[in-house]
Amino acid sequence: MKKNITQKILEDHLVSGKLEKNNEIEIKIDQTLTQDSTGTMVYLQLEAMNIDSIKTDLSVAYIDHNTLQTGFENADDHEFIKSAAFKYGLVFSKPGNGICHQLHLENFGKPGGTLLGSDSHTPTNGGLGMLSIGAGGLDVAVAMGTGIYRLKMPEIMNIKLKGDLNPWVSSKDVILHILDILTVNGGLGKIIEYSGKGIKALSVTDRATITNMGAELGATTSIFPSDELTYKYLKSQGRKKDWIELKADDKAYYDSTIEINLSDVVPLVAKPHSPDNIATVNSLDGLKVDQVAIGSCTNSSYSDLMKVAKILKNKKVHPDVSLCISPGSSKILKMLAENGALADLIESGARILECACGPCIGMGQAPKNNGVSLRTFNRNFYGRSGTKSADIYLVSPETAAVSSLEGKLVNPESIGEAVKINEPKIYKECKSLFIYPIENRKNLEVVMGPNIKTFPLKDKLQDNIEGKIVLKVGDDITTDHIMPSNASLLPYRSNIPYLSKYAFSTIDENFWEKCQDNGGFIVGGENYGQGSSREHAALVPLYLGIKAIFAKSFARIHKANLINAGILPLEFIENEDYKDLEFDDKILLLNLKNELTENGIIEITNKTKNKKIKGKFNGNSRDIQILKSGGYLNWINKKLEADKE
Ligand code: MIC
Ligand code: SF4
């Protein structure tokens, strides 16, 4: 059979199952990554698993999200993660080194390999042909402990790129164009494989921008072939030995294919408050801008920032605009410093921020009240910037830079000839902020500060569950709605009781109070839980006593997180039934021990309305065992014990 890239990598890593659509498979994970805002949970879970050593070839613990240290909490989390990294033999990336995905691309990602990361943008490394999947922290902890990840075999969608990019159009515009076509749930249950002659127009970092925002399509991951451009990139990073050629066979099978002519793409913008709310830059020409933020794991590469520096050279940022720039890695910052581009940026009036996620996750630079912020980031969910009244627009680095000079949104074409940057032949060594594993790790202990609380464990699933609907929400609810993140909340990622006070606070400020009478149920629309991989969006509802969530559909990572936490996700069989469940209705689920079966149907009794509707449990026998054990940690511990005997 003619194979696509995904099939080739999965075949190489298959531990069990058949590579057929929707089948449960187990694959070997070569590498894992964690970042600090999900990482504390991961290492608490790894500790609770009681293992001696990790089973991956390489695991890296990055500190990049919570780098604002306004109190001891974040610093304590860093210390805890560092001590866990030492204990288990991981590479540790200190705060200030850069954003996990950019650093991983530069230093560790390998074509043909598998990577599991506790961050939804892990697919960034698909830009160099690595099958890179984002998952909840517990799945990553288990992958470290056992070397294995289980998933439902996704469909493979081929996006064929042809033609060439017009001047001033970049890979960010390409992925915004794709988001316009597919929307934020168009990638659900799919791996997206890019092919076609058009890929030659895209460097590895351009490709990484596209695979990065595959997360916004809801895709399991996205991947590019590994070709001579991949070779050049790895060689420039001093890693040519990591290169292998990887491409789909001629006439390989795909479940679906779409074709995109790169020359049809124009400068685009994602309007508030969703990455698929796409318009052309021209259609919003002249929109007054207060802030421009350049960086994030989507657009902070060397060539992105060099383009920005070239545009800003010898010019001044508009007096009404605050322009901030966060480079993707310390290596990139060092290169900009050495070649003079940093001086050009400073001279133009840019604020240079730390190499970290920064404003992308609301760690500083919240816009002014009712402010308009143009960002090169990947998410513009409501409230994420830290200012609820602000409007966030997602754009390319070119559009961001040119608009920062004009004080308004403008098409970069308006300034004349496009800037061109050649990828560097050699990326300078810059490893001072990495700490590598030491040989003798015996007797090393983890260090836990007072802010680190153990996470909630659940009792075994009860046979009958009764409670009230405490919240009903619409479609595309994000994890930023469920468990907001910003500079004041991120320090409490290892403190579920504290975080619980803020669950759903952008939607219903009284949610916490409504849950105090023994929790209950939540009703959601399509794509419930899209966005981040944060387990907190499951652990906090668990802590508040949420027992089941009824939705039209769930986002992949969030659904896995709910099951891992021990919360039952049920999907309406008839979307119409959504209307029959309302806030405060009394709900009963009966006889779950028998009724909960593989892809089975559960009766949802609405006692208030005296009505019965049906919900589907889209899960397998292992998911059922996990739910019945009261969560993945309880289940895996039993399994590891049994394996030892
Ligand atoms: C995000 O971009 O939303 C985050 C912050 O990186 C999250 C992880 C988190 O919530 O800690 C993600 O993408 O998974
Ligand atoms: Fe960090 Fe933003 Fe990327 Fe998330 S999306 S990893 S917060 S830069």
Image: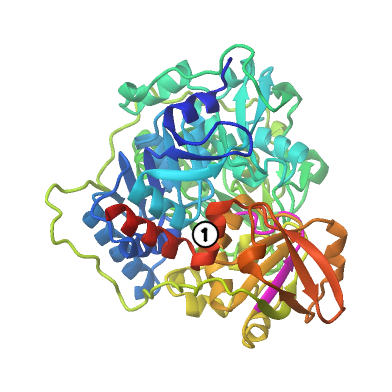
With respect to residue 170, does 199 lie above or below? Answer: above
Which corner quadrant holds the N terminus?
top right
Q: Is residue 609 left or right of residue 635?
A: right
Q: Mainly helix, strand or loop, the magenta region? A: loop
Is 534 inside the magenta-drawn segment?
A: yes
Is 246 inside the magenta-drawn segment?
A: no
Residue 457 appears in the rendering: yes
Q: Please, what is the three-letter code of the amino acid marked with disc 1?
A: Gln
Secondary element at image label 1? helix
Q: Name the residue under label 1.
A: 625
Q: For residue 169, what is the image quadrant?
A: top right
Which corner quadrant holds the C terminus?
bottom left
- Estimate the x, y position of residue 609 in percent, counting from the top left: 87, 78
With respect to residue 642, does 516 lie above or below? Answer: below
Magenta extent: 520-535
- Estimate the x, y position of residue 284 in percent, counting from the top left: 80, 46
